[in-house]
Image (cartoon, rainbow, N blue to C red):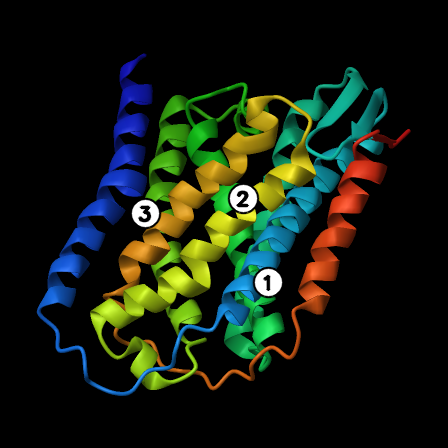
Amino acid sequence: MNATVQLVVIASLLTVVVGPLLWGAVGLLRSRGTAASVAPRSEWNWRPTLHSTALYAFSFSLIFFIQELFLVVPKALTPGLRPTLFHNNHHWDGDNPLAHLFQGTGALAILLVAIACTAWLKLRPPRGMGWRLFAIWMAFHGYFQSLPQIVVGSVVPQNDVGMAFDYLQLGAGTKLALGLTALPIIAALAIGFAKHLLALAPQAGDIATPGRRSGFMFRIATLPALLALPLIIAMRVPGSLDQVAIVPIAEFVIGVWWLQAAAWSTGSARVAGIAPARSLAVPVLAVIAQLLIFQLVLRPGIAFF
């Protein structure tokens, strides 16, 4: 392991492991010293948790599909390349130097989707719980499936984004700078999403103290993300470990840990008065339909030639 790789690995561990653990520990200490009876709070309702679970899983797989689609389509339009889209990957036959460049188009596409969903949340935030959660999780997954690829691609040439970097003939210093720049952006984005999620609280008392903010974040984001992992993996089997489980688990560690760790300190969050979800049927049926599409349509492969 050379010095550049060591630097990126150490910086990554500090950002996605040590940082949230320390910040969360500070929050735990602060929570102990805060009075519990600041304002009345609502009782735990499982409906928002399950709603968030379904939309977390649906949005994850939709973002992944968009990424793979935009990895395949440019290759399909390139002479000499014959790509095939699968449920957890894509493959191509033939040879063209542009194939390496187009290994970066998937990450670019989902990054743009994330930016668009962020603008949606800022300019015209949905008033219903379902659409608000959908916008939040689409933006979240778009960022946290794309930006880590920049970090990995800065030191791993075989990574999709790493191939694009090499095609563009980026120097080692430039790639290192991009990788190290992406890390604090990842942490800052996760902290920013904490405010959006805390705004979904039914009443102000639910997020009135550091401890209550941490508790609500666990119910609306951390627990749903954990419950969603088996659903996500079910859409991606069969396949190798990196195709099936590593990506969703890595995203959980990179993004959701920061959400939970940052919740206590997001005192600026204000309840948005979101209309409660009327039914779980729509998100649950959406996940079931998505699972069927992934396993029955995408798993055999769709040839784009």
Q: Amino acid at mark 1?
A: Ala
Residue wearing tag 2: 229
- The quarter of the image holding the C terminus is top right
Residue depicted at x 61% and y 38%: 233
- Between the residue at mark 1 and the residue at mark 2, the CA separation in whole angstroms equals 25 Å
Residue depicted at x 81% and y 26%: 83
Q: Is residue 72 above or below residue 95?
A: below
Q: Which mark is residue 184?
A: 3
- Between the residue at mark 1 and the residue at mark 3, the CA separation in whole angstroms equals 21 Å
In depth, the one of 101 and 138 nearer the eye is: 138
Residue depicted at x 68% and y 63%: 283
Secondary structure at numbered mark 3: helix
Residue depicted at x 69% and y 46%: 66
- The quarter of the image holding the N terminus is top left
Q: How dense is the environment of label 2, judged by Cα within 10 Å: few (below 14), some, or many (20 and up)?
A: some
In primary-sequence order, the first of circles 1 and 2 is 1
Secondary structure at numbered mark 1: helix
Single out the mark in the foreground, 3 or 2: 2
Residue 125 is situated, as x and y percent measured from the top left of the image, at 55, 77
In primary-sequence order, the first of circles 1 and 3 is 1
Q: Is residue 282 visible?
A: yes
Secondary structure at numbered mark 2: helix
Q: Amino acid at mark 2?
A: Leu
Residue 148 is situated, as x and y percent measured from the top left of the image, at 45, 38
Single out the mark in the foreground, 1 or 2: 2
